[in-house]
Image: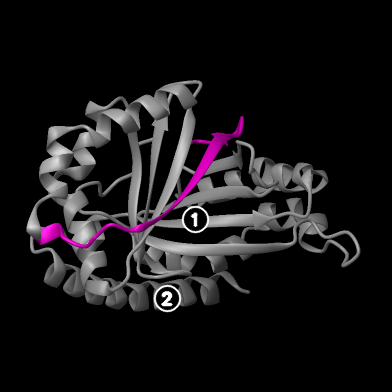
Amino acid sequence: MQRRDFLQASLQTSAAASIAACGLATSSSTAHAAAPATADRELYEWRTYRLKDKAQQPAVHDYLQSAALPAWKRLGLGPVGAFTEIGPEASPSIHVLLVYPNPAAFAAAREALEADAEYVKATTEYRTAKRESPAYDRIDSSLMLAFSAAPKITPPAQKPRVLELRTYENHNDDRAQAKVAMFNDGECDIFPKCGFENVFFGETLIGDNQPNLTYMLAAPDMAANEKGWKAFLESPDFIRMRDDPKYADTMPTITKLFLAPTDYSQV
C-alpha cells in the first residue's frame, strides 16, 4: 500500500471510530451520568494465544518480545502486558493486554502494523508458519472500555508480583450496568486499602459471555492475595455497598485467572 493510500485509510477508520466513540459515550452516560467522555477512557484488548503445549511458547514469546512490542510502541500503544498462567490448573496459553488511548487508535492499529516494514520483516517466519508446525493454535480476543473511576491503566510498582484477572458475568444488562456503577461509585477504591494495587478495570464491548466486566489486581504473592481478599470481604465499605438496594442482585458468576508477567511485560 502506498503511504498516501494508507494515510487516507487511517483517516477514514479514525473518523468511523470517532463516530462510534460518540455512540459509546451516549450509551454510557445513560447508565452512569457521572462518567467522563469515552475519549478520556482507554480501550483494552485482552488477547489470548492458545497453545497446544509449552513447546509452542518460545516462538510466541520471541514474536512478542522482538517484533510485536517494539512495533506497538512505534504506533504509540502501551503499556503492553504479557503474561503466563500460574497455579495447578494453568494452561500453556500466553495472554497479552493491549492498551489503546482511544477508539481511533484501535481502528487504525492493524493496518498500521501491516504497513510497518520492520515488523513485517521480523515476523515473516512466524506469520507464515506451516500447518504442521503452527506458532499457536488460535487467538481469542475481547475489547473493553475502561471504567470511569479508573480511566487509565496503572502498571503495578511492586516486584515480584502475582496478578489476578477476574471476569464478572451478570445475568442481564441492567444488573451488569449496576455492577459497573458499584465499582465506579467506590468499590474500586476499596482494593488498595486491602493491600492490592489496581491495574485496570474494563467493561467488555466485544467478546464472549456478555454482559461482563474484567479487572486486574496485583499483589506481592499468593499469600498476600488471599489476605487481601479476606480484608476486602470484611471491609465495612464493601459490606455497605453490597447491602445497598440499588446494587441488589448483582452477584456475578466469577472467573479467576492467576498470572505472572513475562520478563518483557510492561505491566
Q: Within the magenta stretch, is there residue 121?
A: no
Residue nearest the viewer, comparing 200 with 37: 200
Q: Quick one: label 2, few (<14), some, or many (20+) residues within 10 Å?
A: many
- Residue at coordinates 28% horizontally, 57% vertically from top-left? 251
Question: For the residue marked with disc 1, what is the amino acid?
Answer: Trp
Task: Indicate which disc residue 118 carries.
Answer: none
- Residue highlighted by disc 2: 13
Badge 2 amino acid: Thr
Q: Position of residue 228 (x, y in %)?
A: 33, 28
Q: Is residue 88 above or below residue 122?
A: above
In which quadrant will I find the N terminus? bottom right
Residue 119 place in picture, x, y as percent: 67, 53
Which one is earlier in the sequence, the residue at label 1 or at label 2?
A: 2
**Which region of the structure is painted magenta?**
246-266
Q: What residue did someone put label 1 on?
A: 46
Taking 151 as reference, is 261 above or below it?
above
Q: Quadrant of residue 175?
A: bottom left
The residue drawn where x is 35% and y is 45% is 200
Tag in front: 1 or 2 = 1
Q: For residue 35, say whether it is visible.
A: no
Please state the horizontal and vertical placement of residue 230, each as a whole percent of the image. Answer: 31, 30
Query: 154 or 110, which lies in front?
Result: 154
